[in-house]
Amino acid sequence: MSATATTEKKYLKWYQKLAYGSGDLASNCSYGLVSSFVLLYLTGTLGLDSAIIGSLMLASKVLDGISDVIFGTLIDRTHSKLGKARPWMLFGQVGVSLCLFLLFAIPAGSTTMQYIYFFIVYTALNAVFYTANGIAYSSLVALITKNNNERVQLGSFRFMFAVVTNIFMGFAVTGMVEKFGSGAAGWRTTALIFAIVGLVVNTISCLAVKELPEEELSGNTSEAAEEGKAVAEEKKHGFAETAKILVHNKYYLMILAIYIVYYIMSNLTTGAGVFCATYYWGDGSLLGQFSMMKMFPVIIALAFAPVLIKKTGSMQKVNFWGYAISSVLGIPMIYFAMQKNLSMFLLFMFIKGVFAGTLSGSLNALIAEASGYTTRTTGVHMDGMMYSCSSLGVKVGGGIGTAAVGWLLKLGGFVGTATVQSESAIRMIFNLYITFPFVIGIIITVLLAFLDVEKANKKWDAEHKKEAQA
């Protein structure tokens, strides 16, 4: 096993890995700004109702979820000089940047028209352009390298950029809004800056890498598969048939479930963070520190995740035990939050994040393993469809998480224009930012315990190698 790993072909230069990872900086210029701040903009600046906004977000996500599988199929069927995924990644970002600016530039008018405007632009941003760009970006992991260690490294690079971007936003966005005139004008200018940065960085990320030739990609995933190539020959299937194959892959469903619950958790904390800092801890400027203690540990985790995974030979083991320890550490974190001991709360948030952070760098590599499982067992090569679980999970989970913040704030009695909130509203904010994410972390740990796709692939390879030798 170790001998095979040391001779595994390398496909990427260091700068290509770095350039690919920077694509998540571009992605989070839009995703991070919307998930963390759009509710504050809509309720605080425009005075819109948080529960109605939450409902519109969830309705939009229904359309968003449908578009994921559609774009996954389109990517699989694309043939161009840029390859399968890169055209969608390149041109999808143009629409993302345009819609990001428009979302934070809602014109004055009747409240009803503002809700309609928001729904249209928010849906176009997420269901069309972000979907096309996001699935293409994620699927590149399987299209630019066949080296599993490089795939893990790519995941680490991209999430490092995501972490840094979100930390920067936590410290900078509210200050940028004030600097550019506060209110609607401040949000509009801030969104424009992030839209331009996203467009430039995404273009660099897309053009710095090159997809492998289709004949190499459609080749089999291992020596054993090569010997049994009649089983692994690529076949052409219609949308319905490929969708059926997809939902019958239990590992696809597990990874999709992990993505959904992970991003419910993520968007609960990002959406409620500014409210928790302002109303529970009494200092809105703490948001930057919260973002750093939440995100910076992930950089540390991603730095040593490839080493741990290579040493153990299992992404599942590293991720499961990391999340199990993180869940236990959540108990003292909640206790110190209830005691309003800020220093100890931040310390346990940091340590907890280090153990949970390994998952961020290996999820894309796990999807590649799940895609390899499909190729092995059915003979169908469908990376675009397989990677739809990342975009689908991000947006369905993110949509539910963001919508839940709006609904539950309203249920708790939160009033956007009030400077002092009721005790029930503050209690709800505490649960949104701290208690509910703790429970979701336990659910993720359980799912990881069953995600043995690497073991299943090794078993299949061993069995078919014996058959080929016989």
Image (cartoon, rainbow, N blue to C red):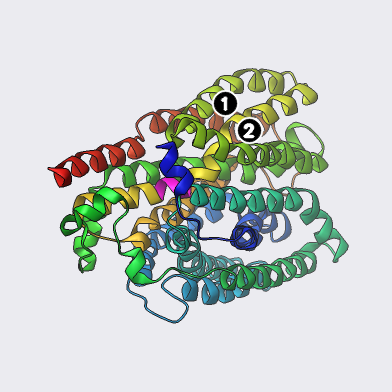
**Residue type, label 2:** Gly
Give the x, y percent position of residue 435: 58, 28
Q: What residue type is disc 1 on?
A: Ser
* Circle 2 SS class: helix
Q: Residue at x 41, y 81 (%)?
A: 80
Q: Residue furthest left?
A: 470
Whole-percent x and y of residue 356?
57, 33
Tell which of 151 and 204 is nearer to you. 151
| Residue 363, horizontal then vertical, whole percent | 47, 45
Residue 347 shown left or right of residue 96 in the figure: right
Magenta segment includes 366: yes
What mark, if any, has residue 326 been given in the picture?
A: 1
Instruction: Mark yes or no: residue 133 visible.
Output: yes
Quick check: marks 1 and 2 in contact, CB under 8 Å? yes
Q: Nearer the viewer, residue 88 or 263?
A: 88
Residue sitting at 55 percent across and 22 percent down? 325
- Residue 413 visible to the viewer: no
Q: Earlier in the sequence, mark 1 or mark 2?
A: 1
| Residue 359 covered by magenta stretch | no
Residue at (39% x, 71% y) in the render: 213
Q: CA distance from mark 1 to mark 2?
A: 7 Å
- Residue topped by disc 2: 353
Q: Residue at x 62, y 36 (%)?
A: 304
Task: Point out the stretch of residues depicted in magenta.
Answer: 363-367
